[in-house]
Image (cartoon, rainbow, N blue to C red):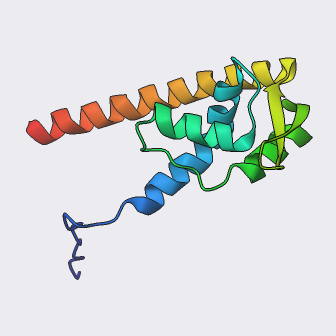
Amino acid sequence: MAKRSIRKASKSYDTGGFKTLLKRATTEMLILLTLRKTPMYTYEMMNTLERLSGGYLAFNTLYIAIYRLRELGFIDETERVISDNNRVRVYFSITESGQDYLGNLVEEYKRFSEVVDVVMSASEIEQGA
């Protein structure tokens, strides 16, 4: 029986794809979290997430997630404002069903994170043994 060789990841291995998948998986939750306190327009949401994450989370576009949340009734357009440079700012706010959905997302995220932490801790203990 032939031995299989296992490639080890080099120190320069790019994890950007993993980061992208994590961002994609949590985008809706992060949008709803930002809208919990006050209505915002899309660019304002992007800046808020970037600021709160210390620049780690920078979203090129949230539009797809915003349209999905809107279609599902989790956010509503609250007003349209013309800015100083004649651009239309569409403000969104979270709905009551969006609050419920957010609660479920946060609960599931916490459960998932706890399980990942347990598995990682167990793996570290087994490696040290």
Task: From the top left corner, tell me how far across and down residue 86 is, in percent.
Answer: 84, 49
Task: From the top left corner, tell me how far across and down residue 129 is, in percent.
Answer: 8, 36
Residue 73 visible to the viewer? no
Q: Residue at x 81, y 26 (%)?
A: 93
Q: Residue at x 65, y 28 (%)?
A: 34
Q: Looking at the image, is 41 positioned above or below residue 35?
A: below
Q: How many marks?
A: 0
Residue 32 visible to the viewer? yes
Rendered image quadrant of residue 94: top right
Decide which of 65, 61 is in the foreground and name it.
61
Task: From the top left corner, tell me how far across and down residue 17 is, in percent.
Answer: 46, 62
Quarter of the image with the N terminus in it: bottom left
Decide which of 54, 110 is in the foreground and name it.
54
Rendered image quadrant of residue 92: top right
Decide which of 34, 88 is in the foreground and name it.
88
Residue 42 appears left or right of 69: left
Q: Residue at x 49, y 44 (%)?
A: 57
